[in-house]
Amino acid sequence: MAKKVLVIAEAGVNHNGDEIQAIALVDAAMAAGVDIVKFQTFKSENLVTSTAKQASYQSQNIGKVESQLEMLKRLELSFSAHKRIKNYCDGKGIEYLSTAFDSESLTFLVDDLKLTLLKIPSGELTNTPFVLEHALTGCKLILSTGMATLKEVKSALQVIAYGLLKVDGKLATTEPNENAFRQAFNAERGQQLLSEYVTLLHCTTEYPTAPENVNIRAMDTLKESFSLAVGYSDHSLGITIPIAAVARGAQVIEKHFTLDRGLPGPDHKASLEPQELAAMVRAIRDVESAFGTGLKQPTVTEQANSIAARKSLVAARTIEKGELFSNETIAIKRPGNGMSPSQYWALLGQPSSKRYQAGDILAE
């Protein structure tokens, strides 16, 4: 049976820096039936300079122009708040996940919160020193690939292979460098570890993403290029595209959600509301159920329906015993519990073994 699709509800910063609202997002994710609720952990001063400008979608969605630092300070949750949210998730039986955007936050998530699964966001994919820090934790990794070329994805995977081999104890004490990264990636054990530890997410870093910019087939390219598990991190409006991604083979779906799309903030407008999140989960589970075994054979319910839906060979008129069957004496009608119409030609010209009334199902 195919592995269950992992559904990650991306709360992100849609709590607007309010811990109570973050807890409410956990409850909404629980009610929707997702597997994981994910937040973002960062220290604003560690993440951006004071002069870093907002992305255009951020200023548009917030409704004002300000520095990234000013915006992020309002959206930041303290480490202690994240710890309380993690404890709340544990108590409710839903997995807590958070994306670290700086080294201090990554250390907190691994050492303090004891996370064993980490998400590397699209914006950090080319930050290879930080990517290496993730790999050296020995945690399972989900790598999002928004804005990336295939070459950049490969470079990040080379670094991850190096880090995983180092944790595995199968790497000589060589210092990190491009040649060491390539060798690690090309090593058989490096490939094995990537397969065990890494999932790639196709993603378009645009909020919201127009359907013509989604390019779901790029998910296929990632899988064919690196032979790794793949999924899709969605920023489109609605639930249609993530469902299509599941049908195309996504093993992980990540989707932003919010309590209210009308709330102020950079990501609310491209997020699902709780009832939509629940609808997406139901649809994904329905698609999973529809995958089946791949064997082309009738189901139990089809077998029961075949009698009513299929046809049999029947007597078109009275047929005397010994009379030769012809196209004038044989009709094809429901029900389907007699001789199959596929035996029609074999029966032509053969003598009837008994007398039939018109409408009788032939039994030769």
Image (cartoon, rainbow, N blue to C red):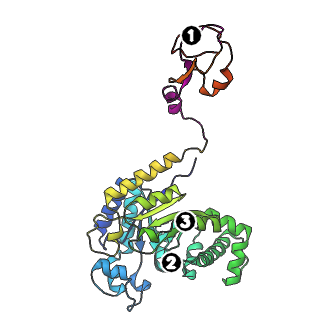
Q: Nearer the viewer, mark 3 or mark 2?
A: 3
**Residue 343 seen in render:** no
Indicate the amino acid at tag 2.
Answer: Met
Measured in 3D between alpha carbons, the distance from the residue under mark 3 to the one under mark 2, in whole angstroms, is 15 Å
**Kind of element beneath mark 3:** helix
Question: Residue, x 67% and y 68% (percent of image)?
Answer: 168
Contact flag, marks 1 and 2 (Cβ < 8 Å): no
Nearest to N terminus: mark 3 or mark 1: 3
Tell me where the magenta segment starts and ends, as one range: 296-323
Q: Residues within 10 Å of mark 1 (few under 14, many from 20)?
A: many
Residue at which label 3 appears: 217
Query: In the rendered image, which residue does mark 1 sit on?
Result: 356
Task: Identify the residue at image location x=49%, y=29%.
Answer: 309
96 relative to 297, above or below: below
Which mark, by number, is residue 87?
none
Marks 3 & 2, CB-CB < 8 Å contact: no
Q: Is residue 302 magenta?
A: yes
Residue indicated by mark 2: 147
Residue 312: % across, % down: 56, 23
